[in-house]
Structures are given as structure tokens and as C-alpha cells.
Amino acid sequence: MSFLDHLMPSDEAEMIRDSATRFTGAVSESALRQSDGFAAERWAGMADLGWHGVLADDAAGGLGLGAAEAAILAYAAGHARLPEPFVASSVTALTALRTAGVGIDVLAGLVAGSRIFAPVGFGLPVGLATPLSVAPDKEGASLSGTVPLCEVGPHTTDFLIFADGPEPMLARLPSVADGISIAPYRGIDGRHLGKVHLDDCTVGDEAILARGAAARNAVAKAEAFTVAALCADAVGTIDKALVLTRTYLNERQQFGRPLASFQALRHRFADIGVEAELARSMAEMASFAAQTLADPAPLLDRARARICRAAQTVGQATIQLHGGMGMTDEMAIGHYFRRLICLQALLGQEAGSLRLRSAALAAEIDAEASLEAAQ
Amino acid sequence: MVKNLEYRQPRDDVWDHIDLLLDDSLRAFRGEVRQFLRTAVPDETRARLDMGYSATKSEVVAFLKKLSAKGWVAPAWPVEYGGTGWSQLQRFVYTIELGNNAAPSVPPFGTAMVGPVLYTFGNQDQKDLYLPRILSGEDFWCQGFSEPGSGSDLASLKTRAEDKGDHYLLNGQKIWTSKAHYADRIFLLARTGEGARKQEGISFFVLDMDTPGIEIKPIISIDMSHSLNEVFFTDVKIPKTGLVGEAGKGWSYAKFLLGNERTGITNIGRCRRQVARLKRIARASHVGDTPLCADQAFLRDLARIEADLTALEITEIRLLSTGRDSAFANVGPSVLKLKSAEIQQALAELMVSALGPFAAGRGPQFVEAVEDVSDLPQVFFDGALAEYLFGRATSIYGGTNEIQREILAKATLDTLQ
Ligand SMILES: Cc1cc2nc3c(=O)[nH]c(=O)nc-3n(C[C@H](O)[C@H](O)[C@H](O)COP(=O)(O)OP(=O)(O)OC[C@H]3O[C@@H](n4cnc5c(N)ncnc54)[C@H](O)[C@@H]3O)c2cc1C
């Protein structure tokens, strides 16, 4: 499939978009606030619509689709600011599991919504090396280290852990296991997060899903799909922040006129609209790159950098344009702003993305120099 | 002094995300364009343009001859008028290659501005007379829209063409008329009547520049070059054949023209070449003892612009590919115009800052004086500043950035409730 084909959504993709829009459209502001970071019935509703299996094969009960369709759902989740770990479990963990070639039994639970995976040591936040190390053990392996940020909560049923060492590995452990401790906390946008500490945590051979290059490959693929999904989530969040701001500017009157009639505000709104379009372009490119390229990192780093910038610019401007109301917890706009902050952290921040791109540029400059010197 | 820093053509074996768009036939097409440009643009011209200078008229004429022989002067025109019949994607690739290969820019006044107006609204005689001469490179055109009192508010223009029965009598003044001193012909807006709204009563004319009563005065721009002019009309007779379309409908033709103008100016190819140039400068230039290519601040700036440029490219591709969201078709051109101006200006700024102290001087004497004390070959001096200075205009012409924001706000803040 070419990038142009990718830009033309299939009928199936349009159906998914419609059904997602209908589903999230029914989520009320009060329901969101009451759900305290996770609503079991919402998670089950997503399962009914096929969200958790969007990337899983038919045999596991999934839809067998790709990063583009996962991005449509992540966009909807962002637009409605759903706090549930859709990306973490249904995109990041599922992609790693699938790439590692795990059995249908493992995937089927995730797809059905009864198992919720928390990736540990890979995927989220993007672009960090795993802080977990692996040592050989008579029963299999022993894992140690601390991961400061994981999308883990009371709903988590399984950990999917990536640890590095002479032989890196991807292992699955139940959420309650010897040698694992969790310090739970909340994301700025209300999602469940936690610090996960592994202290000589023993994993038996049966829990090890992939080793060596296979494990690395599974994690790399998962990370690429994660970037694509988070980018789409951010664009959904940005779009909703723009909708709320447009409404506010047209309704609120000062000096006897709607705010939307003041040029300084009109131009600021135009500028954040431009940011949104650039972010949308990058999200389109990211899902295509994640799906089709063997080494999508150079493009995904650019996408992360650009989308983090857009998230920051749009978030700040939409608060400013709401005036004092933008500072209140009561207004939804602040909640979207906070989601954008959280998403930037999960995406590794603009600075982190640019750092990687800068290093790659330095290497490209070197390579060109030696190439030309050799000629 | 570091060697091997001169301009190099893009390589076919280096993968790039534009390749995402290409199938085998498009890749072959790009190869053909590159092959053609390798010989169609003399090395000297290429080197000068890559330094940041603009092409001389003779360089443009020579290049147009080569393009004309290929039939590639105005690819976007309908085939019946001499277009190539290429797909949008082929045109996209072609335009990128022109900029990326440091070819002289094809003057937009004939191909992108008046040409489409003539084949869309002109009569048969006008099409037969003017279009072939644009395609052959024989006729250079200039654009007489702006006036001293009418810039962003173009419809307030005052230049008047009075209907004298067998001709129109033109009096008034235009300003910022790019390349008028090179031009054989001018297309212009003038008032032929009054209406309830200022947009009414404006007509669109074409006129030979050697018609008696036309006077051109140069305006030297901040880069100390001459491309801008004032053009004065005193009792100039426009033959009736010079009226395009209907009298009084000129404003709608002008809007059609400006819409075309706005989409053709992203200059992605040139931006890509500038990124490549910055990388070469970074190999040779130093900040204190640190080579620029190890300077985190420089690399960060470059990485940020590169990400912006990629986003611009994808945005242009989205606009080309029909289908997805038609709402975007309205705002897309303004998004591209705003953002491409910003990126071009950011690149020029980074270029100048990369030159360090050597950004301050100008001209052959300066180049000679510092040649032996600079890390950089002289090819990088001088032109960068010219490019930076003239580049300030990218956010002014073709509808200023503020006017683009007005267009965007109208489309996204006012109407879509
Ligand atoms: C290098 C160059 C080449 C050009 N070539 C040509 C040419 O070949 N032919 C031709 O006809 N014209 C040409 N132009 C003219 C160009 O189209 C005008 O400069 C442009 O339309 C702006 O008009 P102005 O210069 O009168 O600025 P003004 O309209 O006076 O604007 C001055 C400033 O005020 C801002 N402004 C104006 N109105 C508003 C508003 N309503 N709200 C907010 N801000 C506003 C503008 O954005 C700008 O920043 C050229 C200009 C340049 C710089």
C-alpha cells in the first residue's frame, strides 16, 4: 500500500470511525468525571465494538487491522479524553504479544476485555531504554530494576515486561507476583499510573515469551505502533480543545461583542488551527510508517517532536483564550490541556524526540563527510 | 579550508520519505527529471543559485529554452494548451526536483498566474497569441495588481481604464511590480466603472510593456538588489483586445489567480536543498573550538526545522490527495502559505547564524578579504544573507501572513458552528 492509498480510508475504516464517534459521543462529562480513571463498563463497551482486538488476528477474535485503524480509535479516545489504558494495553502490549508470536489463548482474553496488560520497561514513555536488567536464574531468569512510569492500575491483570541484559527478554507475569511491587499514582489527566519495582523477580521459562532479537523486535514494533497511536490520541485531544475554544469564543461577549470578533484572538485561533493540521499530517505519516517501514524511527522521532510542539502550543493557547474560565477545573478545556501534557510525557517530550533526531543528524553529517572524502 | 563542500545533486540511492509516495513508474519519472536537470542547468548557475543568489534573466531564459524543448514549462496547464498531462503527484515530484536541483525558478507570472486566467476566461485570439509565447519562454510577464494605497486591501485600487470606444485609456500607478524591468507584457487590474461594492467595476487587462505612456522606476530592496518596481501609466492606450473576459468581472478573475498563486509557493524542494547546505556548512564551521555539527543548539534548531518541513510536505500531499476531508481543501492553501513562509524564513535565519561572523559582510571585496581566515569556502558567504533578507518577503507577498490568518479564522472560527 502506498502512502496515498493510506490517506484514502477504506470503507471498513470509515465504519470504525463512525462507530467510535457514536460510542464516545455518548460518554458524558459527568460520567467521565465519576469514572475515576477507569470504568469497567466503558472498557467492556470498547471490547464489544472491537477496540481491543483492532490489531489482533481473526483467530484471536480480533479485527486483523493495522496502525491506521488503531489510530482512528486512539483519536476518538483523545477526542473524548477517555482515561482507560486503550493505547497501553490494546496497542502497545498487544503489538508486542502479537509480534512475539504468543498463543491465541493469551490474546483472546485481551481482545475480549477480560485481561488488561500493562507494558513495563518499553513502549510508554516512548524512546527510553528499559531500566530493567535480566540475570540468569536456575528456574528461568531473574529481573531487577525500577520503572518510574507505567500505565498500571487496579484494573491491570497482567504485566508485559521487557528487560535487557546479555539476552534481553519479554516476559508475562500476573499483576500480583513475588518480587514485584507497585507504587500507584495518578497522571495529571486522571489516568492510573504507577512506579513498578522488580527485586530479583523470578520468571519461569513458561512466562518468557521471547528472547534476544525476537524480544527486541517485538518491543520495537510495539513502540512504533505506540507512537502512531499516541500521535492520533494527541490530534483527537487537540481537535476537541479547538472545538471547545471555538464555541467559547463565539459565546462569550466582552465590550459588547463576541470574543470571536477580536482580531488578536482570531489570529491566535488561526495559528493553533495550523498547528492542528501539521499535527494531523504527522499522525497520518506516523501510522503509515509504523505499519510499513522496517526502520520507521527517523520519521517517528520527527512526528513525536512536531506533535508535542503542537500539543503544547494548542494547549496553552486554548487556556489563554478562555481567560479565567480556562483556569478552572470546572471547565472541560483544562482537562484537555492536562491530557495534552500527559501525552507529551508519554511521547517522550519534544526535547527528547529532538535529542534523538539531533544525534541522527550529526551522524548523517559525518556519514556524508566520509562518503565524500572517500570519493 | 575543508574541501568537498560544493553543491551535490540529490542521490538516487538515498531513501527519503518522499519515496513513500513513489511506485516504480514515479521513481523512473523522478530519475528522468533528475537526468534532465543534470545537463539542463549549467554547473555555474547551479552553484550560484545554491549559494542563495537568484537567477539572472539570461540564466532563466536559457533554462526555459531547455524546458520548452521538453514541453515542461507549464505542467499544470490542460494538455490542449500545452500542459504535460502529468498526475498531481508527478507535478509534486517535478516541482521538488526543480528546487532540490537548484534550477532557476520558472517565473510564475506567465505560467502560474496569467496563463490559467487566459485559458479559463480569455477569448480564442488571446489564447492563441499569448499562451504559446509563455510556453516558449519568449514572453516575460509581470503582475500589476498592488498600488501605493492598495495592498492587502487590493480591491480599493484606483488605477482607472476609461472606455474610449475603440480603446481604453489607462491612468494610475502600480507598485511592487516584480521584474517589470524584464517584462514584455503586464497583466493588471484597473477600474472601468463603479459599483456598490469596491470589488465591482474592476477589469482585468493584458498590455504590452512597450506601449507609450508606461514608465518604470526601480525599487531597491533590503537585499540591495533590484527586482521590484513602480510602474506609472499616463494616458496609456489599451486596445480593446487587451480586456480579458467581461468588463467589471476582473475581481473574480483576480481571486481565481491568487488562489492558484497560493498553492504554488511552498518551495519544498528549495527548503530540502537548504537543509543539505546547512549540513555541509555544519561540517566546516565552528563555534569556538566546537565544530558546528557537534553543537547541540544548532543541531536542535535544524532538527526542529526538519520536523516542520516534513509536516509541511505531508500537509501538501494531503491537500493533493483528494478524498479525505473536503473541509481541508478550503483552509489547506492558507495553512501551506503561512507555514512555508515560516519554514523558509527559519532556514535562512539558521543559515545566517551558522555563518557566525562571516554573515556580516557582503560583496566580492568582503569575500576576498576573509577567504583565507574562514573555515568555510567562500561559496557560502554573501548569498546566504541575500537569501535571508529577500526571504522576509515570503510572509508578505501572495497575501500576507495576517491575511492568511484572516482567511483561516473566517473558515474555522466563524462558519463551522
Ligand atoms: C518581494 C515582493 C514582491 C511583490 N511582487 C508583486 C508583484 O509582482 N505584483 C503585485 O501586484 N504585487 C507584488 N507585491 C505586493 C504584495 O502583494 C503586497 O506587498 C501585499 O499584498 C501587502 O500589501 P502592502 O505591502 O500594501 O502591505 P499592507 O497591506 O499595507 O500591510 C502592512 C502590514 O499590515 C498588515 N495588515 C494589512 N491589513 C490587515 C488587516 N486587515 N488585518 C491585520 N493585518 C493587516 C499586513 O499583514 C502587513 O503586515 C510584492 C511584494 C513583495 C514584498
Image: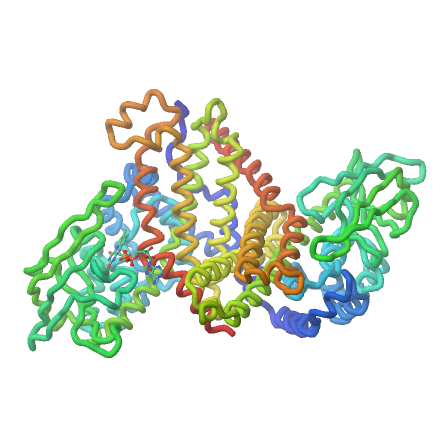
Left or right of residue A167: residue A8: left
Q: Quadrant of residue B284?
A: top left
Q: In which quadrant will I find the C terminus of chain A?
A: top left
The total of numbered circles placed on residues is: 0
Extreme-bottom residue of the structure: B196
Q: Quadrant of residue A162?
A: top right
Quadrant observed for ligand 1 in the rendered image: bottom left
Residue A319, how many percent across, how many down?
A: 57, 58
Q: How is the image coloured?
A: rainbow
Residue B190, how many percent across, how many down?
A: 18, 68
The image shows residue A147, relative to residue A69, as above or below, that is: above
Left or right of residue A25: residue A112: right
Left or right of residue B117: residue A181: right
The image shows residue B237, relative to residue A67, as above or below, that is: below
The image shows residue B224, relative to residue B129, as above or below, that is: above
Q: In which quadrant will I find the N terminus of chain A?
A: bottom right
Q: Residue at x 61, y 48 (%)?
A: A296
Q: Which residue occupies the foreground of this view, A35 or A218?
A: A35
Residue B387, how many percent across, how many down?
A: 33, 42
Extreme-front residue of the structure: A255
Extreme-top residue of the structure: B372
Decide if residue A100 is in sight here: no
Residue A164, how many percent across, how many down?
A: 78, 38
Decide if residue B114 is in sight here: yes
The image shows residue A49, relative to residue B313, as above or below, that is: below
Q: Which residue occupies the foreground of this view, A261 or A231?
A: A261
